Image (cartoon, rainbow, N blue to C red):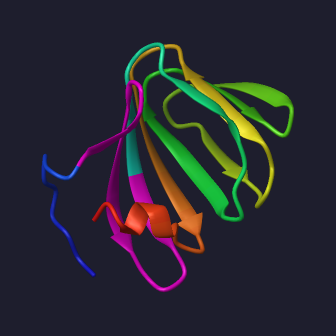
Amino acid sequence: MFRNHSPEGYHQVLDKIELKTLAFGEKTLLSEFRLRKGAKLPSHSHPHEQTGYLVSGLLELTIGGETFLAEPGAAWSVPPDVEHSGVAKQACVAIEVFSPPREDYLKLV
């Protein structure tokens, strides 16, 4: 699969949070999240391993009860079924990989 950049294809998934599925394969899914300042990602878990990278902004992440302040260039990994949440302290762009691919995000392609 190959895709060039496009400003289209973003979906609002929560208040102040947009998601775009960038690419996917049999075992992974790559997504981009845009969070406006003040966006809150409620505490949740899922059966997917999740690895992320903060492109821009300032994001407070809580993973398994431990809180981190992510600045541009920060990276994280959330094991399957571990509770995690976040708050955008500034407008943010984050890139995340899910394995296996999230069926709910594939529906947004």
Residue toward you, 90 or 47: 47
User: Which residue is located at x 50 percent, y 53 percent?
Assistant: 96
- Picture coordinates of residue 91 (x, y %)? 39, 20
Instruction: Reply above or below: 21 against 62.
Output: below
- Picture coordinates of residue 93 (x, y %)? 39, 35
**Magenta stretch prevailing secondary structure:** strand
User: Which residue is located at x 48 percent, y 70 percent?
Assistant: 103
Q: Residue 33 lies in what quarter of the image? A: top left
- Picture coordinates of residue 71 (x, y %)? 55, 26
User: Which residue is located at x 48 percent, y 21 percent?
Assistant: 39
- Picture coordinates of residue 65 (x, y %)? 86, 32
Residue bounds of the magenta highlight: 10-31
Residue extending farthest bottom: 26
Q: Residue 17 lies in what quarter of the image? A: top left
Instruction: Reply above or below: 16 against 89.
Output: below
Quarter placement of the C terminus: bottom left
Q: Is residue 53 magenta?
A: no
Instruction: Indicate left or right for 88 with 65 as reference.
Output: left
Instruction: Indicate left or right for 66 with 43 as reference.
Output: right
Residue toward you, 55 or 9: 9
Quarter placement of the N terminus: bottom left
Badge count: 0
User: Which residue is located at x 41 percent, y 56 percent?
Assistant: 31
Instruction: Indicate left or right for 2 with 82 as reference.
Output: left
Instruction: Reply above or below: 25 against 107.
Output: below
Q: Is residue 15 magenta?
A: yes
